[in-house]
Image (tube, rainbow, N blue to C red):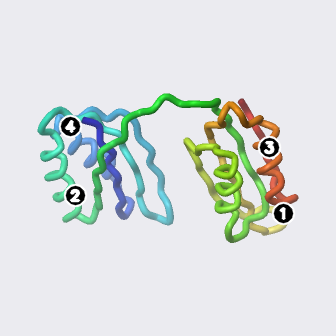
Amino acid sequence: MRVIVMAVGVDRPGLTQTLADAIVEAQGNWLESHFARLGGTYVGSVLVELPAGGLAELKQAAKRMDAEGFHISIETAADEKASEGRTLAFELVGADRPGIVREVSTALAGLGVSIDLFESETEQEAWTGTTVFRARAEVMVPDAVSIDTVRAALEDISGEIVVDFSE
């Protein structure tokens, strides 16, 4: 059985170790993970392979961690489907504004493009002090949609957004 363990807590040394210990105690295998500090909070997700009976033990460990202020949720992972289309990676840079992620995700969804990875951040430009939005994405583009069509849809969002593609 594969599960996704999601963790959120006030960042402090040892949080990843606590989570790894719980997975090992449940005889699980840590397959894949993503962790980051967002707003001073430790946020992560782990794909775990569990043996029969391991889920109950992992849920007990999650309750203990919840009591310590490290909030854990566990969801059954979906079955992997064969990817249809081709992978495209790109980076966006532009002036930050409310709604920019919605505009990007709407442009992609309108083309039937699926987001596999999306990372974003904002930063202050050193010379102007303006806030800049940066995003990195990996998407699955349907075979019927050209890369030029994806590029045009993203560049149509705003003349202030620069899109850099890598295939």
| Residue 29 % position (x, y) | 27, 32
Badge 3 or badge 2: first in the primary sequence: 2
**Marks 3,2: beta carbons within 8 A:** no
Q: Position of residue 64 (x, y in %)?
A: 16, 58
Q: Which mark is residue 162?
A: none
Q: Residue 7 sits in which quadrant?
A: bottom left
Q: Nearer the viewer, residue 62 or 142?
A: 142
Amino acid type, residue under disc 1 in the picture: Trp
Q: CA distance from mark 3 to mark 2?
A: 44 Å
- The mark lying in front, picked from 3 and 2, is 3
Q: Amino acid at mark 2?
A: Met
The answer to which of marks 4 and 1 sits earlier in the sequence is: 4
Determine which residue is flagged by label 1: 127
Tell me the amino acid under the disc marked 4. Answer: Val
In the depicted structure, whether residue 27 falls above or below residue 150: above
Q: Residues within 10 Å of mark 3 (few under 14, many from 20)?
A: some
Q: Which residue is mark 3?
A: 151
* Residue identifier under label 4: 24
Q: Which residue is mark 2?
A: 65
Which of pointers 4 and 3 indicates the residue nearer the eye? 3
The kind of residue on which mark 3 rests is: Arg
Q: Secondary structure at mark 4?
A: helix
Tell me the quarter of the image containing the C terminus: top right
Residue farthest along the front direction in this orientation: 144
